[in-house]
């Protein structure tokens, strides 16, 4: 943590209490001048800090910034958030998380950025990442599970995002196979999970999460393959990104702990309960051809199970899934 982060953490752990420059200097082993400099820097970021002669400094209000000290304060997790790295701008939080993973940082390390210049989605698609409005983060995990089970973590993170949107933003978010979260048919969040592994051993998994929270309509690209939305566009209310992120990390930690204890079955059930296409007629575009059937859930490895008209179950490992229109159903 930087001196600024440490001072902010002191303010957070001493709410409604004045801290003198001398006391902060002693606790952090920095000069009084350094204390004043960091308080000034916090004020420039938008923190409202009161200074009273002979009493010291007191934090009155904080802006909607995703700073490491703010995120870690009050976070109660077993695995996630053991270390938080906050960046004002980066190319991609997944790229930074991978670099840190290769350097050997702790499991549960979280990389969060206010803006991404090269955010990526599934199949290399660009993820628009304007500053100050959304959540862009990556979480490093080192699960001791068979390599073939790693894709199950995508469904775990999807459930955590959807449940957090529903709790914090009062939405009815649903999960869409394989890695999207939608509200009223429009994409509000995407996941990009990446892995480093050998044949029989996982070195690490990176859970990449992008959630459109306060994005305005004119901030979306003009041409999108699928409709997109944000929590603000759906509710008309701004989302406190710090509160959202802390709730998401705690939800993710709860389900990751459960996953390590009990396996994929509880997560699979939650995902199926949130799935927007369960028991619906769908069309699956697999590139080489399309097939139609009814979604009946996930299998033990996370493949989508689609039942064809003849009763046969197809395992879908890759492809774009979309509901069959009522017109097409009537024609069939």
Image: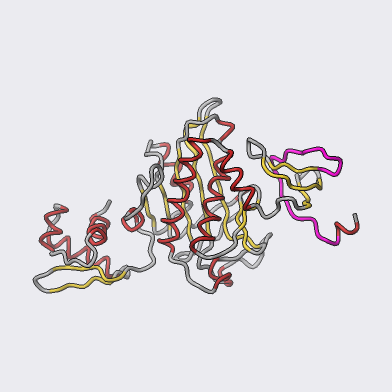
- Indicate whether 43 appears above or below 70: below
> Is residue 319 shown in magenta?
yes
- Indicate whether 269 appears above or below 51: above
**At 27% from the left edge and 70% from the top edge, which residue is drawn?**
43
Foreground of the two, 306 or 2:
306
Q: Position of residue 61 (x, y in %)?
A: 30, 70
Q: Position of residue 283 (x, y in %)?
A: 78, 50
Q: Position of residue 248 (x, y in %)?
A: 46, 54
Residue farthest along the right direction in this orientation: 331
Image-quadrant location for residue 7: bottom left
**At 48% from the left edge and 42% from the top edge, which residue is drawn?**
256
In the picture, measured across the screen, residue 70 lies left or right of residue 22, that is: right
In the picture, measured across the screen, residue 143 lies left or right of residue 234, that is: left
Foreground of the two, 90 or 251:
251
**At 85% from the left edge and 62% from the top edge, which residue is drawn?**
327
**In what quadrant of the picture does the C terminus appear?**
bottom right
Q: What's the magenta region?
A: 308-327
């Amino acid at each position: 943590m930087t001196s600024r982060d440490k001072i902010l953490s002191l303010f957070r752990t001493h709410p409604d209490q004045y801290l003198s420059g001398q006391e902060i200097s002693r606790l952090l082993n920095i000069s009084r001048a350094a204390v004043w400099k960091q308080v000034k820097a916090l004020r420039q970021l938008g923190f409202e800090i009161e200074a009273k002669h002979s009493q010291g400094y007191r934090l009155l209000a904080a802006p909607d910034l995703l700073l490491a000290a703010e995120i870690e304060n009050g976070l109660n997790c077993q695995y996630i958030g053991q270390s938080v790295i906050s960046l004002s701008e980066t190319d991609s939080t997944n790229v930074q998380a991978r670099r840190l993973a290769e350097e050997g940082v702790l499991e549960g390390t979280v990389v969060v950025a206010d803006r991404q210049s090269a955010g990526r989605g599934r199949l290399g698609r660009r993820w628009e990442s304007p500053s100050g409005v959304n959540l862009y983060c990556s979480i490093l995990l080192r699960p001791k599970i068979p390599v073939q089970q790693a894709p199950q973590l995508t469904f775990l993170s999807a459930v955590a995002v959807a449940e957090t949107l529903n709790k914090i933003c009062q939405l009815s978010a649903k999960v869409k196979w394989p890695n999207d979260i939608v509200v009223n048919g429009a994409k509000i969040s995407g996941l990009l999970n990446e892995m480093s592994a050998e044949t029989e051993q996982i070195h690490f998994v990176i859970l990449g999460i992008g959630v459109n929270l306060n994005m305005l309509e004119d901030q979306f690209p003009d041409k999108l393959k699928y409709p997109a939305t944000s929590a603000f566009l759906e509710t008309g209310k701004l989302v406190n990104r710090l509160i959202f992120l802390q709730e998401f990390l705690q939800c993710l930690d709860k389900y990751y702990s459960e996953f390590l204890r009990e396996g994929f079955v509880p997560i699979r059930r939650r995902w199926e309960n949130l799935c927007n296409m369960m028991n619906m007629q769908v069309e699956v575009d697999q590139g080489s051809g399309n097939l139609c059937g009814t979604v009946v859930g996930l299998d033990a490895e996370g493949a989508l199970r689609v039942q064809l008209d003849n009763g046969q179950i197809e395992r879908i490992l890759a492809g774009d899934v979309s509901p069959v229109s009522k017109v097409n159903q009537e024609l069939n």
